[in-house]
Amino acid sequence: MQRRSLSKADWIRQILKGDVRSASRLLTLVENQDRAARPLLKALFRHTGKASLIGITGPAGAGKSTLINQMITLFRREGRSVGVLAVDPTSPLSGGAILGDRLRMHPHFLDRAVFIRSLATRGAWGGISPALFDAIHVLDAMGKEIILIETVGVGQDEVEIARLADVVVLLLSPGMGDEVQMMKAGLLEIGDVAAVNKGDRRESRELHHQLQETIRDRPLLKISAEKGTGVPSLFSEIEKALAKQALRHARRKTFIEAELRTRLREILGETIFGTSFNEGEIEAILLRKRDPYGLVRSWIKKARTFSLIP
Ligand SMILES: Nc1nc2c(ncn2[C@@H]2O[C@H](COP(=O)(O)OP(=O)(O)O)[C@@H](O)[C@H]2O)c(=O)[nH]1
Ligand SMILES: [Mg+2]
């Protein structure tokens, strides 16, 4: 079939059936901020809300992608379909890192029940990109039962993304500073479950020992994502957290609030930063014939009247 001739209804049907090419095509529209995506996303939305969102966060090099690879294997063994969103905080163009991740996840790359996609984090006006929410909804609509979200670091966006998931795993590893440095960076506050990776190395056992003093309010595990040791225990902690209905309910509400705020920011940002002020208005303020307070208010009033806010 010619992809070009795919009707909107067929396109939606294909995504709901889990078709990778149809979903990829929509996600490309989403990434390009193409308005043509909107009616499809709207139509898909009522089919979403079923997937479990698992956030994997921690410093670069901690072993998040390696762990995700292991988790995919475990989930697939249970017959569950998996989607992975690798959120790249630096730039959507850092192809090297993305390729590296893809290679690391390679064993599953051809498995049709696993869908992997990299995304940029930031929206055009700051904050989380609305594309992240769109992508989560698309994977959910595809019938992915598990959506793994990999985020790097502890910037405000990453922390916010981490808080959206139903359960968040904080992954640490030796060589990223000691416990005190991690605490100062605010790293240790994130996560429902914490794990020290690279347990095959002695420094990792030391770090795990140190952290036992600090991390007492949630499970702290020692794993080796590469060897697979400790991963089943981590897996069962994740399952336990997912089974907590109250936690899940609270996270889902946080998710909706964050999504609404993100979408508002995007629309208002477009309106605010897309506005060009006319010379006369700038001149009037320069000559102190008008003031910025009044001008902005009159402009908002006008924007409302003429429905300039989309
Ligand atoms: N020794 C050891 N190295 C590991 C382990 N897990 C991951 N690594 C290595 O750590 C590096 C970073 O892993 P990666 O999964 O890309 O980390 P990410 O940046 O957090 O996604 C890679 O070279 C991995 O091979 C582990 O359990 N033990
Ligand atoms: Mg990675």
Image (tube, rainbow, N blue to C red):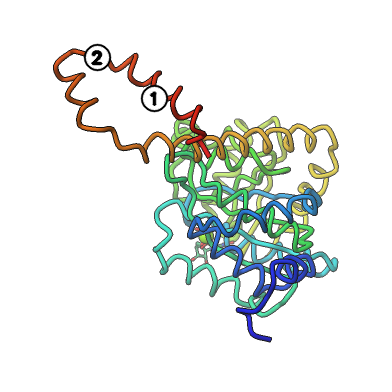
Q: Residue at x 48, y 39 (%)?
A: 127
Give, as a three-letter code, the residue at label 2. Arg
Residue at left offset 59%, top offset 69%: 25
Measuring 47% from the left and 45% from the top, which residue is drawn there? 123
Q: Position of residue 76 (x, y in %)?
A: 78, 69
Residue annotated with mark 2:
290
> To which quarter of the image does residue 68 belong?
bottom right
Pointers 1 and 2 in contact (CB under 8 A)?
no
Q: Secondary structure at mark 1?
A: helix
Picture coordinates of residue 23, whole percent (x, y): 66, 67
Q: Residue lying farthest left?
A: 287
Q: Which mark is residue 133?
A: none
Query: In the image as oriented, which residue stretches furthest toward the front?
Result: 306
- Check disc 1 and give the amino acid type: Trp
Give neighbour class at mark 2: few <14, some 14-19, many 20+ (Cα, 10 Å). some
Earlier-in-chain disc, 1 versus 2: 2
List x then y, in percent, for residue 42: 69, 51
> In what element is the residue under mark 2?
loop
Instruction: Report the residue marked by disc 1.
Output: 299
In terms of depth relative to the viewer, which is nearer, 207 or 286? Answer: 286
